[in-house]
Image (spheres, grey):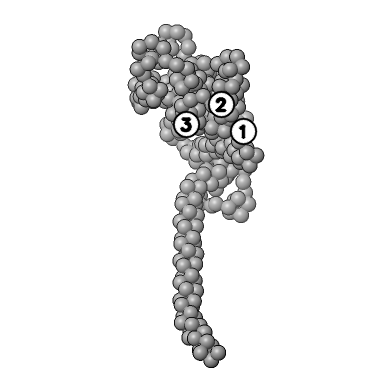
Amino acid sequence: MFVMVEMENAANMVWRPRAAARSLAVRIDRQRLTAGRIATYLALCSWAIMCGFPLYWLAIASIKPVAVLGAAPRYIPFGDFTPTLASWRFILADPAETLLPSFVNSLFIGITAAMTSLIFAGLAIYGLTRLPPTGRVGSRLSPYGLMAALLSVRVVPPVVIALPVYILAGQAGLLDSRSLLVGVYAAVNLPVALWLLVPAFGQRATDQEEAARLDGASHLAIFFEILLPMLLRPLVVTGLFLFLLCWNEYLFAAYLTFDHAQTLSPWMVGQLSMKEAQAGGEVEELAHLAAAAVFMVIPGVLLAAAVHRFLGRNLAGGPS
């Protein structure tokens, strides 16, 4: 009995230092992990401030009085200065300077062009991956080869395409029309839609598609009634990305429109050019441009938030 007790005490004496060392190592690892997290959060917060401060500056510049905007920097509304909506009234309510027609044009053209690109890209992928190739040429071409050829159109600088499109549109009488911009935007962004949607569509028909085909459904019915509802999430995300590309497009809108179909990007550049040509009133024009820039950002932010909420709701509810 005495020998067993002594052996147990000796084992405890050996185990205690090991346990203490193990506990110390765990505490050190936790401290390192905590320090790493703090450093990561500090870096992310610093980067977020660097990225968000220009937008914050634009937002407060759009509500600053002209006298305050030209004075020393002030950043806190109702603390450093009293906000005013004079710049917003100018860009929204002034009959000669309002940007609402350009805003409506950008919204209509962006949404229509994005939806057109989505539909044609989906039909192209469906035909390349679900339908058997016909003819000697079709049997030798792979879907990825055809999409790579289409992607080369997007690689070409837009200024190279703008000139022939301008000449053809002028001969057809389509210059300064919404339909022209919708067609150009949809065609230019079609390769982007193709490459973003290929992983979602897959390389072969799903079981639901094959079952519908056995029941006698047409390819168009399968595409619109079965396949598109199954791929709603990737379609929404791709549509948002395409809309943002159309919303920020400047070159084609500047070349192909003048007044009736003008979008927000050429309007903003025109306002900047007018500001540079003016001898006075720079500070007042700066406030107007800040309000216009904030107004231009709002639709993209709202759409991104809506898409994020839609994806979160659908992911929480399972596959759509």
Query: Which residue is disc 2 drawn over?
Result: 207
Is residue 288 visible in the rendered image? The answer is: no
The residue lying at 48 percent from left, 28 percent from top is 202
Q: Nearer the viewer, residue 244 or 189?
A: 189
Q: Secondary structure at mark 3?
A: helix
Above or below — where is 58 with respect to 180? below
Q: Nearer the viewer, residue 278 or 311?
A: 311
x and y percentages locating residue 29 in the rendered image: 46, 67
x and y percentages locating residue 226 in the rendered image: 60, 23
Q: Amino acid at mark 2?
A: Asp
The residue lying at 62 percent from left, 30 percent from top is 93
The residue lying at 47 percent from left, 47 percent from top is 51
Q: Secondary structure at mark 1?
A: loop
Query: Which residue is disc 1 drawn over?
Result: 320
Label 2, label 1: how far apart the Cα atoms are: 16 Å
Q: Amino acid at mark 1?
A: Ser
- Mark 2 or 3: the one toward you: 2
The residue furthest bottom is: 2
Q: Secondary structure at mark 2?
A: helix
Query: Which residue is disc 3 drawn over?
Result: 199
How many marks are shown on the rendered structure?
3
Query: In the picture, which quadrant includes the N terminus?
Result: bottom right
Query: In the picture, which quadrant includes the C terminus?
Result: top right
x and y percentages locating residue 215 in the rendered image: 61, 17
Q: Which image quadrant for residue 94?
A: top right
Instruction: Please indicate whether residue 246 sits to the left or right of residue 101 in the image.
Output: left
The residue lying at 52 percent from left, 16 percent from top is 179
Label 1, label 3: how far apart the Cα atoms are: 17 Å
Whether pointer 1 and pointer 3 mark residues with C-beta atoms closer than 8 Å, the reply is no
- Which comes sooner in the sequence, label 1 or label 3? 3
